[in-house]
């Protein structure tokens, strides 16, 4: 599968997930790590509850789509077959209140325009702005490229000084670098640098992660009014697909400085550019205040979790961006290393954003914040990459047991559904194991041991059950050469006789033995019989309830 960038991804990104054969978790886009809003998903799904499918008879059976009796299926679904309303007053009010509060809600509603993602609106702004050159934020090395693309497509020339521009494009917080200007700093810069007659576009799409006081940290309505009196028009852009994790639906807004400017943009916009599904999702998401509370609590914690471990693995890397942002901007210092990490991430199903594509920063990577369990998959792949880059010799993995090196074939990540248990678990014991792990300050468990040929679980059934109950889909396993003479099942005098063939055969048939029917041992090179679990490395912080 090709890992070269597809057409268009050099500007916007989002295509990396289509370069992997099996996606585990997408680290390439800066969406909310909590995933889509549950209540909004339910609301959107209910739009399809009104489906009606009936059969119409008396039509020619020879035509495609008809059965031998001349019956044809005829479907009806209002949300799919009908145009949505041009104006959604409920959505306008919810969004206006979300952005400016109840006091300015009525005024704000009249200044909002919705579009098919922020990208459509960025393109619209570039076409509608006064003729002349454009300028990006001169204080950041690179910013979201949609603005540059849109302005260049309208024939504008990029200039270095904002005083020479008719349209000034600012992204705050800046994606991808993570730079952020607080309200006073941003407003002072605009006041000092924007010339009369210019349009200033401030993209605040990532500001929602700043915390409960995010409304007090963006450009204020009072400042927008003051600048308008100086003939400087400020447009605030919001992409809702990031904070509410709905990039597949596409919806964004622009808060215009006046009703007249909103009407100007709307006159150039194609009608019905926002689907009823996107509108319904956003309305439900706006009503879920707990979702944002969880976002503000989890994102900084999960980001710190990632940065701490990546710093431990690569102390020379530079980790940039504010601690509350939904991504980490990383300077590896070496284009070769950045590309190697990018390819490693693709190989393990956890794509990241390579800044060589679109941003022309070949040593940089952007990694989205994700929950610790998802990150553990990427992190272990990076650990393995680092081990391989340090030495071409395959060393024994994670065990102090003195066993024949050919017993352990390696450690890898597998999908939990690919594992085949050979015996049942004791429910009581699995529950006690969960309680034990829950009380640990650091979650540490031995890895699961599997037969390398058939993916049959040899040791770790109770751990596997706990991982499955926790919703985990990818787990690290130790693959062993089960046919090796130093691995024994139920040695004489320990338990009833059992053969390796019975273990494998039972699992491959989809059946299971009674709990604790088997006990596996491994012979050390000194001749001692040891529990097979000595081959399992301790996997730290993998399990999170």
Image (spheres, rainbow, N blue to C red):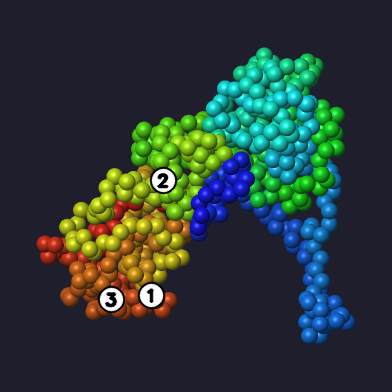
Element at label 2: helix
Q: Which mark is residue 507?
A: 1
Crowdedness near tag 1: few (<14), some (14–19) or many (≥20) residues, C-alpha within 10 Å: many
Residue at 81% from the left image edge and 44% from the top image edge: 270
As displayed, is residue 70 above or below residue 235?
below
Identify which residue, 106 or 352, lies in the foreground.
352
In x, y percent, where is residue 305? Answer: 43, 40
Q: Quadrant of residue 401?
A: bottom left
Q: Quadrant of residue 223?
A: top right
Total residue callouts: 3
Identify which residue, 190 or 357, lies in the foreground.
357
From this viewpoint, which residue is outermost toward the bottom?
A: 69
Question: Cα distance, mark 1 to mark 3?
Answer: 11 Å
Crowdedness near tag 3: few (<14), some (14–19) or many (≥20) residues, C-alpha within 10 Å: some
Residue at 51% from the left image edge and 30% from the top image edge: 322
Q: Which mark is residue 340?
A: 2
In x, y percent, where is residue 399? Answer: 24, 54
Please state which of the two labelled residues, at mark 1 or mark 2, is closer to the viewer. 2
Question: Cα distance, mark 1 to mark 2?
Answer: 38 Å
- Point out the tag, 1 or 2, that comes first from the N-terminus: 2
């Amino acid at each position: 599968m090709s890992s070269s960038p597809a057409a268009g991804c050099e500007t916007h990104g989002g295509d990396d997930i289509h370069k992997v054969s099996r996606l585990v978790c997408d680290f390439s886009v800066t969406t909310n790590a909590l995933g889509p809003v549950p209540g909004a998903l339910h609301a959107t799904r209910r739009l399809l509850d009104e489906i009606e499918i009936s059969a119409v008879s008396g039509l020619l059976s020879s035509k495609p789509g008809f059965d031998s009796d001349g019956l044809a299926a005829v479907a009806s679904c209002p949300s799919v077959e009908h145009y949505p309303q041009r104006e959604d007053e409920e959505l306008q009010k919810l969004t206006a209140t979300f952005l400016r509060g109840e006091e300015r809600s009525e005024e704000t509603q009249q200044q909002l325009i919705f579009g098919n993602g922020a990208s459509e609106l960025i393109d619209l702004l570039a076409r509608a702005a006064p003729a002349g050159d454009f300028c990006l934020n001169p204080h950041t090395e690179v910013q979201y490229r949609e603005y540059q693309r849109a302005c260049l497509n309208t024939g504008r020339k990029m200039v270095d000084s904002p005083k020479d521009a008719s349209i000034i494009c600012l992204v705050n917080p800046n994606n991808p670098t993570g730079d952020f200007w607080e309200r006073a700093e941003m407003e002072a810069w605009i006041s000092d640098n924007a010339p009369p007659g210019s349009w200033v576009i401030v993209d605040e799409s990532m500001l929602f992660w700043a915390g409960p006081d995010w409304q007090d940290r963006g450009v204020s309505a009072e400042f927008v009014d003051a600048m308008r009196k100086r003939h400087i028009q400020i447009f605030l852009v919001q992409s809702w697909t990031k904070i509410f994790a709905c990039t597949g639906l596409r919806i964004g807004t622009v808060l215009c400085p006046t009703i007249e400017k909103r009407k100007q943009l709307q006159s150039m916009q194609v009608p019905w550019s926002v689907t009823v599904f996107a509108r319904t999702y956003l309305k439900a998401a706006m009503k879920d205040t707990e979702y944002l509370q969880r976002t503000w609590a989890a994102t900084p914690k999960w980001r710190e979790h990632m940065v701490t471990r990546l710093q431990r693995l690569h102390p020379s890397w530079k980790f940039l961006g504010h601690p509350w942002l939904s991504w980490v901007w990383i300077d590896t210092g070496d284009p070769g290393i950045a590309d190697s990490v990018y390819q490693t991430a693709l190989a393990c199903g956890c794509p990241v954003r390579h800044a060589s594509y679109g941003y022309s920063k070949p040593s940089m990577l952007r990694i989205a914040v994700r929950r610790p369990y998802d990150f553990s998959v990427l992190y272990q792949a990076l650990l393995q990459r680092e081990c391989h880059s340090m030495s071409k010799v395959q060393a024994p993995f994670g065990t102090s047991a003195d066993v024949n090196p050919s017993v352990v074939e390696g450690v890898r990540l597998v999908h939990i559904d690919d594992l085949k248990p050979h015996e049942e678990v004791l429910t009581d014991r699995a529950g006690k194991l969960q309680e034990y792990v829950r009380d640990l300050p650091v979650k540490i468990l031995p890895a699961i041991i599997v037969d390398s040929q058939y993916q049959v679980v040899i040791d770790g059934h109770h751990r596997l059950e706990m991982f499955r109950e926790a919703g985990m889909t990818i787990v690290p396993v130790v693959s062993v050469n089960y046919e090796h003479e130093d691995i024994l099942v139920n040695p004489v005098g320990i338990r009833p006789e059992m053969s390796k063939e019975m273990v494998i055969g039972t699992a491959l048939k989809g059946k299971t033995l009674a709990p604790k029917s088997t006990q596996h041992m491994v012979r050390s090179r000194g001749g001692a019989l040891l529990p097979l679990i000595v081959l399992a490395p301790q996997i730290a912080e993998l399990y999170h309830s």
